Image (cartoon, rainbow, N blue to C red):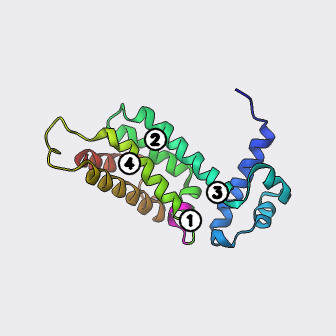
């Protein structure tokens, strides 16, 4: 595997941080490449060395977070709900600026919520309890929609309200609710 130059990573991180900071100030559609370049303290041309346009930059930023959450899915499914959710809520807290901007800001492309929801649905798919018989009469599609919307909704509420409970408390409560639902 080829090692990526740290200067490239630093520039890309600076550009991603700049676009998120700008999105807290104005609608994404109003942000220009020059705004991003000025905030990141780089030339406009530097942005085009890394991304096609501001939409590509935002898409790569979203993809990074969705992929990191997806990596967590691989080992979280081996744990009980509460223990599995603690790292997720810690991740949301550590990346508060990103998630608050993408979930709580007006004028943010709605594709993020859709992608986040789809990733959670995929993670929940194998978690439905069919052995106990309690979900026998329930449609898998309905259960997944219910759980996915509830989970994303609680995350949105938690972020919008400034994370009023620590990640461990959120994991315990949401884990208990998901365990009851799935």
Q: Residues within 10 Å of mark 3 (few under 14, many from 20)?
A: some
- Location of the C terminus by quadrant is top left
Query: Which residue has dot 2 on it?
Result: 87
Q: Does label 3 or label 1 sit earlier along the sequence?
A: 3
* Image: magenta residue range: 102-106
Query: Which residue has dot 3 on it?
Result: 58
Of the two numbered discs 2 and 4 in the rendering, the one whose residue sits closer to the viewer: 4
Examine the rendered structure and indicate whether residue 127 appears above or below residue 28: above
Residue 142: quarter of image: bottom left
Query: Which residue has dot 4 on it?
Result: 121
- Location of the N terminus by quadrant is top right
Residue 105 in magenta?
A: yes
Residue lying at 44% horizontally and 38% vertically, measured from the top left: 73
Q: Kindly indicate whether the residue at mark 2 contacts the one at mark 3 (C-beta within 8 angstroms).
A: no
Task: Work out whether residue 164 or residue 58 is closer to the camera in this orientation and state it.
Answer: 58
Residue 180 % position (x, y): 22, 47
Q: Is residue 80 left or right of residue 118?
A: left
Q: CA distance from mark 4 to mark 1?
A: 20 Å
Query: Which residue has dot 1 on it?
Result: 109
Q: Kindly indicate whether the residue at mark 4 contacts the one at mark 3 (C-beta within 8 angstroms).
A: no
Q: Main secondary structure of the magenta part?
A: helix
Q: Does label 1 or label 2 sit earlier along the sequence?
A: 2
Q: Residues within 10 Å of mark 2 (few under 14, many from 20)?
A: some
Q: Is residue 93 left or right of residue 136?
A: right
Q: CA distance from mark 3 to mark 4?
A: 22 Å
């Amino acid at each position: 595997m080829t090692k990526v130059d740290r200067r490239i990573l630093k520039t890309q991180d600076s550009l991603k941080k700049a676009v998120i900071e700008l999105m807290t100030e104005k609608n994404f559609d109003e942000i220009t490449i020059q705004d991003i370049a000025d905030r990141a303290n780089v030339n406009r041309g530097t942005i085009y060395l890394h991304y096609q346009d501001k939409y590509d930059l935002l898409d790569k930023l979203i993809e990074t977070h969705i992929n990191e959450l997806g990596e967590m899915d691989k080992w979280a499914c081996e744990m009980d709900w509460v223990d599995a959710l603690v790292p997720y809520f810690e991740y949301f807290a550590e990346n508060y600026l990103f998630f608050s901007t993408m979930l709580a800001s007006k004028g943010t492309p709605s594709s993020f919520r859709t992608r986040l929801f789809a990733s959670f649905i995929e993670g929940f798919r194998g978690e439905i309890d069919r052995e106990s018989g309690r979900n026998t009469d329930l449609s898998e599609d309905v259960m997944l929609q219910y759980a996915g919307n509830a989970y994303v909704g609680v995350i949105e509420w938690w972020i919008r309200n400034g994370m009023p409970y620590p990640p461990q408390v959120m994991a315990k409560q949401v884990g208990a609710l998901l365990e009851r639902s799935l």
